[in-house]
Image (spheres, helix red, strand yellow):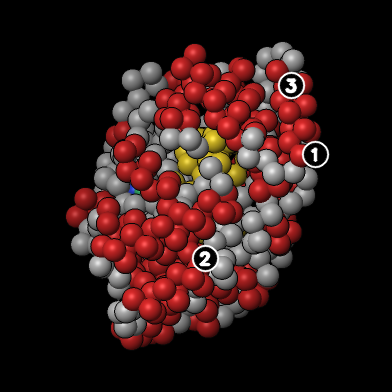
Amino acid sequence: MATQETDVDRFIDQNLITETLEEAQPTDGSRLDDLLAKARSLAGLKVAEAAELMLVDDPEHLAAMYETARGIKQGIYGNRVVLFAPLYVSNECVGNCLYCSFRRDHTKLDRRTLNTAEIERETRWLIEHGYRRLLLVFGEHPHTRVENLVESVEAVYSVSVGEHQDRIRRVNVNAAPLSREDFEILKPAGLGTFQVFQETYHRETYERMHPDGPKADYDWRISVWDRCLPAGIDDMGLGVLYGLYDWRWDTLALLKHAEYLMDRYHVGPHTISVPRLEPAAGSEFSTNSPWMVGDDAFKKLVAIIRMAVPYTGMILTTRERSEFRSELMEIGFSQISAGSKTSPGAYTEEEDYVDDTGQFELGDHRSLDEVMLSLCEQDYLPSFCTACYRSGRTGEHFMELAKPGEIQTFCLPNALLSFKEYLLDHASPETVAEGERVITEHLAQIESDAIRRKTEEKLRRTAEGERDLFI
Ligand code: SAM
Ligand code: SF4
Protein backbone atom coordinates (compact mmCIF):
# COMPACT_ATOMS: atom_id res chain seq x y z
CA MET A 1 0.00 0.00 0.00
CA ALA A 2 1.22 3.46 -0.85
CA THR A 3 1.21 6.27 1.74
CA GLN A 4 -0.09 9.79 1.21
CA GLU A 5 3.41 11.27 1.38
CA THR A 6 4.91 9.26 -1.38
CA ASP A 7 4.08 6.48 -3.73
CA VAL A 8 6.48 3.96 -2.25
CA ASP A 9 5.75 1.22 -4.72
CA ARG A 10 6.73 3.51 -7.55
CA PHE A 11 10.37 3.61 -6.49
CA ILE A 12 10.71 0.30 -4.68
CA ASP A 13 8.78 -1.93 -7.05
CA GLN A 14 9.21 -5.30 -5.34
CA ASN A 15 8.50 -7.35 -8.46
CA LEU A 16 10.77 -5.27 -10.63
CA ILE A 17 13.70 -5.80 -8.25
CA THR A 18 13.13 -9.57 -8.27
CA GLU A 19 12.92 -9.52 -12.09
CA THR A 20 16.09 -7.44 -12.39
CA LEU A 21 17.95 -10.02 -10.32
CA GLU A 22 16.52 -12.94 -12.28
CA GLU A 23 17.22 -11.41 -15.67
CA ALA A 24 20.81 -10.37 -14.95
CA GLN A 25 23.30 -12.26 -17.11
CA PRO A 26 26.87 -13.14 -16.14
CA THR A 27 29.30 -10.65 -17.69
CA ASP A 28 32.02 -11.71 -20.11
CA GLY A 29 35.41 -9.97 -20.00
CA SER A 30 34.53 -7.11 -22.34
CA ARG A 31 31.18 -6.34 -20.70
CA LEU A 32 32.94 -6.28 -17.35
CA ASP A 33 35.54 -3.86 -18.75
CA ASP A 34 32.72 -1.57 -19.94
CA LEU A 35 30.99 -1.60 -16.57
CA LEU A 36 34.20 -0.97 -14.67
CA ALA A 37 35.15 1.85 -17.06
CA LYS A 38 31.77 3.45 -16.46
CA ALA A 39 32.26 3.11 -12.70
CA ARG A 40 35.74 4.64 -12.97
CA SER A 41 34.25 7.66 -14.76
CA LEU A 42 32.25 8.28 -11.53
CA ALA A 43 29.00 8.12 -13.48
CA GLY A 44 27.63 5.53 -11.02
CA LEU A 45 25.89 2.34 -12.05
CA LYS A 46 22.29 1.59 -12.92
CA VAL A 47 20.51 -0.95 -10.75
CA ALA A 48 20.52 -3.53 -13.58
CA GLU A 49 24.27 -3.05 -14.02
CA ALA A 50 24.85 -3.61 -10.32
CA ALA A 51 22.84 -6.84 -10.66
CA GLU A 52 25.23 -8.02 -13.36
CA LEU A 53 28.23 -7.37 -11.15
CA MET A 54 26.66 -9.43 -8.38
CA LEU A 55 27.15 -12.48 -10.60
CA VAL A 56 30.91 -12.00 -10.92
CA ASP A 57 32.69 -14.96 -9.33
CA ASP A 58 35.88 -15.39 -11.30
CA PRO A 59 38.75 -14.43 -8.92
CA GLU A 60 40.47 -12.26 -11.55
CA HIS A 61 37.27 -10.44 -12.36
CA LEU A 62 36.57 -9.95 -8.66
CA ALA A 63 40.07 -8.55 -8.20
CA ALA A 64 39.38 -6.07 -11.04
CA MET A 65 36.16 -5.03 -9.33
CA TYR A 66 37.90 -4.44 -6.01
CA GLU A 67 40.66 -2.50 -7.71
CA THR A 68 38.07 -0.28 -9.41
CA ALA A 69 36.23 0.32 -6.14
CA ARG A 70 39.53 1.13 -4.46
CA GLY A 71 40.44 3.61 -7.21
CA ILE A 72 37.09 5.38 -6.88
CA LYS A 73 37.45 5.60 -3.13
CA GLN A 74 40.96 6.98 -3.51
CA GLY A 75 39.92 9.47 -6.19
CA ILE A 76 37.15 10.97 -4.10
CA TYR A 77 38.29 10.49 -0.52
CA GLY A 78 42.02 9.87 -0.81
CA ASN A 79 43.51 8.23 2.28
CA ARG A 80 41.26 10.09 4.66
CA VAL A 81 39.15 8.16 7.12
CA VAL A 82 36.69 10.01 9.33
CA LEU A 83 36.27 8.65 12.85
CA PHE A 84 33.35 8.81 15.25
CA ALA A 85 31.80 7.03 18.24
CA PRO A 86 28.18 6.17 18.95
CA LEU A 87 26.68 7.56 22.14
CA TYR A 88 23.72 5.41 23.15
CA VAL A 89 21.20 7.70 24.85
CA SER A 90 18.41 5.17 25.35
CA ASN A 91 17.78 1.45 25.15
CA GLU A 92 14.11 1.83 26.04
CA CYS A 93 12.03 0.60 23.15
CA VAL A 94 8.46 -0.20 22.25
CA GLY A 95 9.74 -1.87 19.09
CA ASN A 96 9.96 -5.62 18.92
CA CYS A 97 12.37 -6.09 16.03
CA LEU A 98 13.29 -9.78 15.98
CA TYR A 99 17.02 -9.09 15.60
CA CYS A 100 17.72 -6.45 18.26
CA SER A 101 18.44 -6.86 21.96
CA PHE A 102 16.58 -3.64 22.76
CA ARG A 103 13.35 -5.32 21.62
CA ARG A 104 10.44 -4.97 24.00
CA ASP A 105 10.21 -8.70 24.69
CA HIS A 106 13.80 -8.87 25.91
CA THR A 107 12.71 -8.41 29.51
CA LYS A 108 16.08 -9.24 31.09
CA LEU A 109 17.69 -6.06 29.75
CA ASP A 110 18.08 -3.14 32.18
CA ARG A 111 16.33 -0.21 30.51
CA ARG A 112 17.46 3.33 30.75
CA THR A 113 17.38 6.75 29.06
CA LEU A 114 20.23 9.09 29.95
CA ASN A 115 19.27 12.46 31.41
CA THR A 116 20.99 15.66 30.33
CA ALA A 117 23.67 15.48 33.04
CA GLU A 118 24.48 11.89 32.08
CA ILE A 119 24.72 12.77 28.39
CA GLU A 120 27.06 15.61 29.29
CA ARG A 121 29.23 13.27 31.37
CA GLU A 122 29.51 10.73 28.53
CA THR A 123 30.26 13.57 26.10
CA ARG A 124 33.00 14.97 28.35
CA TRP A 125 34.67 11.54 28.49
CA LEU A 126 34.52 11.21 24.71
CA ILE A 127 35.97 14.71 24.14
CA GLU A 128 38.74 13.98 26.64
CA HIS A 129 39.62 10.87 24.67
CA GLY A 130 39.87 12.81 21.41
CA TYR A 131 36.49 12.32 19.74
CA ARG A 132 34.98 15.27 17.86
CA ARG A 133 32.08 13.55 16.07
CA LEU A 134 29.31 11.55 17.72
CA LEU A 135 26.34 9.52 16.62
CA LEU A 136 23.49 9.65 19.14
CA VAL A 137 21.47 6.42 19.16
CA PHE A 138 17.95 6.03 20.52
CA GLY A 139 15.41 3.25 20.95
CA GLU A 140 11.85 4.14 20.01
CA HIS A 141 9.88 5.09 23.10
CA PRO A 142 7.75 7.86 24.63
CA HIS A 143 10.99 8.94 26.41
CA THR A 144 12.70 9.54 23.08
CA ARG A 145 10.31 11.95 21.40
CA VAL A 146 11.63 14.85 19.32
CA GLU A 147 11.91 17.09 22.42
CA ASN A 148 14.29 14.54 23.95
CA LEU A 149 16.28 14.37 20.74
CA VAL A 150 16.64 18.16 20.72
CA GLU A 151 17.67 18.19 24.39
CA SER A 152 20.21 15.45 23.79
CA VAL A 153 21.81 17.16 20.77
CA GLU A 154 21.95 20.45 22.70
CA ALA A 155 23.44 18.70 25.73
CA VAL A 156 26.27 17.30 23.61
CA TYR A 157 27.05 20.66 21.98
CA SER A 158 26.97 22.42 25.37
CA VAL A 159 30.00 20.57 26.75
CA SER A 160 33.40 22.19 26.44
CA VAL A 161 36.54 20.72 27.95
CA GLY A 162 39.93 22.05 29.03
CA GLU A 163 42.00 25.09 28.15
CA HIS A 164 41.25 24.77 24.44
CA GLN A 165 37.49 24.51 25.10
CA ASP A 166 37.31 21.38 22.99
CA ARG A 167 33.85 20.44 21.84
CA ILE A 168 31.99 17.86 19.81
CA ARG A 169 31.68 19.53 16.42
CA ARG A 170 29.18 17.29 14.72
CA VAL A 171 26.31 15.30 16.15
CA ASN A 172 24.57 12.78 13.96
CA VAL A 173 21.45 10.95 15.07
CA ASN A 174 20.17 7.42 14.55
CA ALA A 175 16.56 7.25 15.66
CA ALA A 176 13.09 6.26 14.55
CA PRO A 177 11.66 8.25 11.60
CA LEU A 178 9.97 11.52 12.53
CA SER A 179 7.05 13.47 11.11
CA ARG A 180 7.82 16.57 9.04
CA GLU A 181 6.73 18.79 11.94
CA ASP A 182 9.14 16.99 14.28
CA PHE A 183 12.00 17.30 11.79
CA GLU A 184 11.29 21.04 11.71
CA ILE A 185 11.59 21.12 15.51
CA LEU A 186 14.85 19.14 15.39
CA LYS A 187 16.60 21.15 12.66
CA PRO A 188 17.55 24.23 14.71
CA ALA A 189 19.38 21.98 17.22
CA GLY A 190 22.07 21.75 14.57
CA LEU A 191 22.26 18.06 13.90
CA GLY A 192 24.39 16.62 11.11
CA THR A 193 23.17 13.46 9.41
CA PHE A 194 19.89 11.85 10.39
CA GLN A 195 20.20 8.10 9.97
CA VAL A 196 17.31 5.72 9.42
CA PHE A 197 18.15 2.26 8.12
CA GLN A 198 15.38 0.56 6.21
CA GLU A 199 16.78 -2.74 7.62
CA THR A 200 15.27 -4.66 4.70
CA TYR A 201 13.46 -3.25 1.69
CA HIS A 202 11.73 -6.58 1.12
CA ARG A 203 8.23 -5.82 2.33
CA GLU A 204 7.22 -9.35 3.31
CA THR A 205 10.44 -9.90 5.29
CA TYR A 206 10.16 -6.43 6.80
CA GLU A 207 6.69 -7.22 8.09
CA ARG A 208 7.89 -10.51 9.62
CA MET A 209 10.88 -8.85 11.30
CA HIS A 210 8.77 -6.05 12.78
CA PRO A 211 5.66 -7.80 14.03
CA ASP A 212 4.17 -4.86 15.93
CA GLY A 213 4.81 -1.39 17.32
CA PRO A 214 5.36 1.75 15.22
CA LYS A 215 8.22 0.21 13.25
CA ALA A 216 5.83 -2.33 11.75
CA ASP A 217 4.78 0.37 9.27
CA TYR A 218 7.05 -0.15 6.23
CA ASP A 219 5.71 2.85 4.35
CA TRP A 220 6.21 5.28 7.23
CA ARG A 221 9.83 4.20 7.50
CA ILE A 222 10.69 4.26 3.82
CA SER A 223 9.08 7.65 3.27
CA VAL A 224 11.14 9.25 6.05
CA TRP A 225 13.22 11.35 3.62
CA ASP A 226 10.10 12.75 2.01
CA ARG A 227 9.44 14.41 5.37
CA CYS A 228 13.04 15.08 6.38
CA LEU A 229 14.19 16.91 3.23
CA PRO A 230 11.22 19.29 3.01
CA ALA A 231 11.91 20.17 6.66
CA GLY A 232 15.36 21.38 5.61
CA ILE A 233 17.53 18.50 6.85
CA ASP A 234 19.40 17.33 3.79
CA ASP A 235 22.08 14.96 5.10
CA MET A 236 20.40 11.57 4.98
CA GLY A 237 21.94 8.34 6.24
CA LEU A 238 20.52 5.25 4.55
CA GLY A 239 21.28 1.65 5.40
CA VAL A 240 20.41 -2.02 5.14
CA LEU A 241 20.85 -4.48 8.00
CA TYR A 242 22.49 -7.31 6.10
CA GLY A 243 21.38 -10.74 7.26
CA LEU A 244 17.62 -10.18 7.26
CA TYR A 245 17.08 -11.02 3.60
CA ASP A 246 18.96 -11.78 0.36
CA TRP A 247 21.87 -9.31 0.19
CA ARG A 248 21.54 -9.02 -3.60
CA TRP A 249 17.90 -8.01 -3.42
CA ASP A 250 18.39 -5.54 -0.62
CA THR A 251 21.43 -3.94 -2.27
CA LEU A 252 19.50 -3.34 -5.49
CA ALA A 253 16.61 -1.85 -3.51
CA LEU A 254 19.00 0.40 -1.59
CA LEU A 255 20.43 1.66 -4.88
CA LYS A 256 16.90 2.23 -6.17
CA HIS A 257 16.17 4.29 -3.10
CA ALA A 258 19.29 6.39 -3.68
CA GLU A 259 18.30 6.83 -7.34
CA TYR A 260 14.82 7.98 -6.32
CA LEU A 261 16.24 10.60 -3.95
CA MET A 262 18.57 11.93 -6.64
CA ASP A 263 15.80 12.08 -9.23
CA ARG A 264 13.27 13.69 -6.97
CA TYR A 265 15.35 15.96 -4.72
CA HIS A 266 18.72 16.16 -6.52
CA VAL A 267 20.39 14.99 -3.31
CA GLY A 268 21.78 11.52 -2.88
CA PRO A 269 22.27 9.90 0.50
CA HIS A 270 25.04 11.57 2.47
CA THR A 271 26.05 8.21 3.89
CA ILE A 272 25.21 4.56 3.44
CA SER A 273 25.65 2.12 6.32
CA VAL A 274 25.91 -1.60 5.82
CA PRO A 275 25.63 -3.18 9.27
CA ARG A 276 25.79 -6.97 9.30
CA LEU A 277 23.56 -8.85 11.70
CA GLU A 278 25.46 -9.66 14.91
CA PRO A 279 24.46 -11.92 17.79
CA ALA A 280 22.19 -9.97 20.15
CA ALA A 281 21.09 -11.06 23.63
CA GLY A 282 17.36 -11.80 23.70
CA SER A 283 17.17 -12.36 19.93
CA GLU A 284 17.08 -15.93 18.69
CA PHE A 285 16.86 -14.72 15.11
CA SER A 286 20.18 -12.88 15.35
CA THR A 287 22.04 -16.20 15.41
CA ASN A 288 19.62 -18.28 13.31
CA SER A 289 18.93 -16.16 10.28
CA PRO A 290 19.00 -18.10 7.00
CA TRP A 291 20.29 -14.97 5.26
CA MET A 292 23.62 -14.40 7.03
CA VAL A 293 26.08 -12.68 4.70
CA GLY A 294 29.57 -14.23 4.49
CA ASP A 295 32.76 -12.17 4.19
CA ASP A 296 33.15 -12.72 0.44
CA ALA A 297 29.62 -11.61 -0.38
CA PHE A 298 29.99 -8.66 2.00
CA LYS A 299 33.15 -7.49 0.30
CA LYS A 300 31.43 -7.76 -3.06
CA LEU A 301 28.42 -5.75 -2.00
CA VAL A 302 30.64 -3.03 -0.51
CA ALA A 303 32.53 -2.74 -3.80
CA ILE A 304 29.29 -2.61 -5.79
CA ILE A 305 27.80 0.15 -3.64
CA ARG A 306 31.09 2.09 -3.88
CA MET A 307 30.96 1.90 -7.70
CA ALA A 308 27.22 2.59 -7.98
CA VAL A 309 27.06 5.70 -5.75
CA PRO A 310 30.64 6.99 -5.75
CA TYR A 311 29.89 10.31 -4.09
CA THR A 312 28.24 8.82 -1.02
CA GLY A 313 30.15 8.31 2.23
CA MET A 314 30.17 4.72 3.45
CA ILE A 315 30.23 3.87 7.14
CA LEU A 316 31.97 0.87 8.69
CA THR A 317 31.28 0.10 12.34
CA THR A 318 32.92 -1.90 15.10
CA ARG A 319 30.50 -4.72 14.35
CA GLU A 320 33.22 -5.97 11.97
CA ARG A 321 36.43 -7.69 13.15
CA SER A 322 39.54 -5.51 13.19
CA GLU A 323 41.51 -7.52 10.57
CA PHE A 324 38.58 -7.55 8.17
CA ARG A 325 37.97 -3.84 8.75
CA SER A 326 41.39 -3.05 7.30
CA GLU A 327 40.64 -5.09 4.18
CA LEU A 328 37.21 -3.50 3.74
CA MET A 329 38.48 0.03 4.10
CA GLU A 330 40.64 -0.42 1.06
CA ILE A 331 37.60 -0.87 -1.16
CA GLY A 332 35.15 1.67 -0.06
CA PHE A 333 34.67 3.03 3.41
CA SER A 334 35.25 6.66 4.29
CA GLN A 335 33.94 6.74 7.88
CA ILE A 336 34.49 4.31 10.73
CA SER A 337 33.53 4.09 14.37
CA ALA A 338 36.18 3.26 16.96
CA GLY A 339 36.18 2.36 20.64
CA SER A 340 32.38 2.00 20.55
CA LYS A 341 30.15 0.97 23.42
CA THR A 342 26.53 0.21 22.75
CA SER A 343 24.69 0.67 26.03
CA PRO A 344 23.65 3.95 27.66
CA GLY A 345 26.23 5.25 30.15
CA ALA A 346 28.86 2.66 29.24
CA TYR A 347 31.76 5.03 28.54
CA THR A 348 31.82 6.48 32.04
CA GLU A 349 30.19 3.81 34.16
CA GLU A 350 31.12 0.36 32.92
CA GLU A 351 34.80 -0.31 33.38
CA ASP A 352 34.33 -3.99 32.60
CA TYR A 353 31.99 -3.42 29.74
CA VAL A 354 30.75 -6.61 28.10
CA ASP A 355 28.73 -6.81 24.94
CA ASP A 356 25.70 -8.53 26.39
CA THR A 357 24.65 -5.32 28.11
CA GLY A 358 24.83 -3.58 24.74
CA GLN A 359 22.79 -3.75 21.57
CA PHE A 360 24.76 -6.50 19.88
CA GLU A 361 28.21 -8.10 19.99
CA LEU A 362 31.14 -6.13 18.64
CA GLY A 363 33.95 -7.46 16.47
CA ASP A 364 36.49 -4.71 17.15
CA HIS A 365 37.28 -3.87 20.78
CA ARG A 366 40.29 -1.61 20.23
CA SER A 367 40.46 1.87 21.74
CA LEU A 368 40.35 5.00 19.58
CA ASP A 369 44.12 5.43 19.93
CA GLU A 370 44.81 1.83 18.89
CA VAL A 371 42.62 2.29 15.83
CA MET A 372 44.35 5.60 15.00
CA LEU A 373 47.76 3.94 15.24
CA SER A 374 46.76 1.06 13.03
CA LEU A 375 45.26 3.47 10.45
CA CYS A 376 48.54 5.41 10.36
CA GLU A 377 50.55 2.21 9.95
CA GLN A 378 48.48 1.52 6.83
CA ASP A 379 49.11 5.09 5.60
CA TYR A 380 45.55 6.26 6.15
CA LEU A 381 44.98 9.77 7.35
CA PRO A 382 42.56 9.78 10.32
CA SER A 383 40.26 12.80 10.30
CA PHE A 384 37.77 14.45 12.63
CA CYS A 385 37.03 17.14 10.11
CA THR A 386 33.64 18.86 10.22
CA ALA A 387 34.49 21.95 8.21
CA CYS A 388 32.06 21.27 5.35
CA TYR A 389 29.01 21.30 7.54
CA ARG A 390 30.07 24.41 9.34
CA SER A 391 30.79 26.17 6.04
CA GLY A 392 27.37 25.22 4.70
CA ARG A 393 28.66 22.53 2.33
CA THR A 394 25.83 20.03 2.96
CA GLY A 395 23.14 18.28 0.97
CA GLU A 396 22.94 19.26 -2.69
CA HIS A 397 25.87 21.66 -2.37
CA PHE A 398 28.05 18.92 -0.87
CA MET A 399 27.07 16.58 -3.70
CA GLU A 400 28.10 19.14 -6.31
CA LEU A 401 31.53 19.30 -4.75
CA ALA A 402 31.86 15.64 -3.91
CA LYS A 403 30.85 14.37 -7.33
CA PRO A 404 33.82 15.52 -9.38
CA GLY A 405 36.23 14.77 -6.56
CA GLU A 406 36.71 18.46 -5.75
CA ILE A 407 35.95 17.95 -2.10
CA GLN A 408 39.61 16.96 -1.89
CA THR A 409 40.61 20.61 -2.09
CA PHE A 410 39.10 21.21 1.33
CA CYS A 411 39.21 17.75 2.84
CA LEU A 412 42.89 16.94 2.79
CA PRO A 413 44.01 20.17 4.52
CA ASN A 414 41.17 20.00 7.03
CA ALA A 415 41.84 16.34 7.82
CA LEU A 416 45.47 17.24 8.49
CA LEU A 417 44.49 20.07 10.83
CA SER A 418 41.99 17.99 12.82
CA PHE A 419 44.44 15.07 13.06
CA LYS A 420 47.21 17.37 14.27
CA GLU A 421 44.99 18.43 17.18
CA TYR A 422 44.48 14.79 18.12
CA LEU A 423 48.22 14.13 18.06
CA LEU A 424 48.95 17.16 20.22
CA ASP A 425 46.25 16.55 22.82
CA HIS A 426 45.33 12.87 23.00
CA ALA A 427 47.66 10.46 21.23
CA SER A 428 50.06 7.92 22.72
CA PRO A 429 53.77 8.40 21.89
CA GLU A 430 53.60 5.58 19.27
CA THR A 431 50.64 7.22 17.54
CA VAL A 432 52.37 10.62 17.63
CA ALA A 433 55.44 9.17 15.90
CA GLU A 434 53.45 7.41 13.17
CA GLY A 435 50.98 10.27 12.88
CA GLU A 436 53.61 12.94 12.26
CA ARG A 437 55.00 10.82 9.45
CA VAL A 438 51.52 10.54 7.93
CA ILE A 439 51.03 14.32 8.21
CA THR A 440 54.34 15.08 6.47
CA GLU A 441 53.59 12.66 3.64
CA HIS A 442 50.09 13.96 3.06
CA LEU A 443 51.07 17.60 3.23
CA ALA A 444 53.37 16.97 0.31
CA GLN A 445 50.40 15.63 -1.66
CA ILE A 446 48.50 18.95 -1.65
CA GLU A 447 48.84 20.04 -5.26
CA SER A 448 48.17 23.75 -4.96
CA ASP A 449 51.15 25.67 -3.55
CA ALA A 450 48.84 28.31 -2.09
CA ILE A 451 46.67 25.78 -0.23
CA ARG A 452 49.71 23.85 0.97
CA ARG A 453 51.28 27.01 2.38
CA LYS A 454 48.00 27.97 4.06
CA THR A 455 47.77 24.50 5.59
CA GLU A 456 51.36 24.64 6.84
CA GLU A 457 50.65 27.96 8.46
CA LYS A 458 47.53 26.62 10.20
CA LEU A 459 49.37 23.47 11.33
CA ARG A 460 51.96 25.73 12.92
CA ARG A 461 49.29 27.82 14.65
CA THR A 462 47.66 24.60 15.88
CA ALA A 463 50.98 23.45 17.34
CA GLU A 464 51.20 26.83 19.09
CA GLY A 465 47.86 26.27 20.80
CA GLU A 466 45.10 27.48 18.47
CA ARG A 467 42.28 25.02 17.85
CA ASP A 468 39.52 24.34 15.34
CA LEU A 469 41.29 25.93 12.37
CA PHE A 470 40.05 24.90 8.95
CA ILE A 471 40.17 25.94 5.31
N1 SAM B 1 15.55 2.47 17.20
C1 SAM B 1 15.93 3.11 16.01
C2 SAM B 1 15.59 2.27 14.81
O1 SAM B 1 15.26 1.13 14.97
O2 SAM B 1 15.68 2.83 13.72
C3 SAM B 1 17.39 3.43 15.93
C4 SAM B 1 18.37 2.75 16.78
S1 SAM B 1 18.80 1.08 16.39
C5 SAM B 1 19.51 0.92 17.98
C6 SAM B 1 20.12 1.29 15.21
C7 SAM B 1 20.33 0.17 14.23
O3 SAM B 1 20.95 -0.93 14.86
C8 SAM B 1 19.12 -0.43 13.61
O4 SAM B 1 18.62 0.40 12.58
C9 SAM B 1 19.64 -1.77 13.09
O5 SAM B 1 20.02 -1.70 11.73
C10 SAM B 1 20.88 -2.00 13.94
N2 SAM B 1 20.80 -3.31 14.65
C11 SAM B 1 19.79 -3.75 15.43
N3 SAM B 1 20.06 -5.02 15.85
C12 SAM B 1 21.26 -5.37 15.33
C13 SAM B 1 22.06 -6.57 15.40
N4 SAM B 1 21.67 -7.63 16.06
N5 SAM B 1 23.23 -6.59 14.71
C14 SAM B 1 23.64 -5.51 14.02
N6 SAM B 1 22.92 -4.35 13.93
C15 SAM B 1 21.74 -4.28 14.57
FE1 SF4 C 1 14.01 -0.79 19.09
FE2 SF4 C 1 15.42 0.14 16.99
FE3 SF4 C 1 16.19 -2.09 18.32
FE4 SF4 C 1 14.03 -2.13 16.82
S1 SF4 C 1 16.14 -1.77 16.09
S2 SF4 C 1 14.17 -2.99 18.89
S3 SF4 C 1 13.17 -0.11 17.12
S4 SF4 C 1 16.11 -0.04 19.12
Q: Residue at x 52, y 58 (%)?
A: 72
Question: Which residue is at the front of the view, 72 or 133?
Answer: 72
Name the residue carrying label 3: 460
- Of pointers 1 and 3, the one earlier in the residue sequence: 1
**Residue 16 — which label?**
none
Label 3 CB sits under 8 Å from any ligand 1 atom: no
Could you tell me which secondary element the residue under label 2 belongs to? helix
State whether residue 300 is above or below residue 19.
above
Mark 3 is on which residue type?
A: Arg
- What is the x, y in percent for residue 20? 38, 83
| Tags 1 and 2 touching, CB below 8 Å | no
**Which mark is drawn over residue 450?**
1
Q: Earlier in the sequence, mark 2 or mark 3?
A: 2
Q: Considering depth in this image, is 354 or 39 the residue closer to the camera?
A: 39
State whether residue 357 is above or below residue 326.
above
Neighbor class of circle 2 (other Cα within 10 Å; few <14, some 14-19, many 20+) is some
- Disc 3 is placed on an element classified as helix
Q: Are marks 2 and 3 in contact (CB under 8 Å)?
A: no
The span from disc 1 to disc 3 (Cα, nearest Å) is 16 Å
The amino acid type, in three-letter code, at marker 1 is: Ala
| 101 lies above or below 48 | above
* Mark drawn on residue 40: 2
Q: Which residue is nearer to you in this view: 2 or 69?
A: 69
Image side of residue 55 versus residue 306, left or right = left
Residue 368 visible at all: no
Of badges 1 and 3, the one in the foreground is: 1
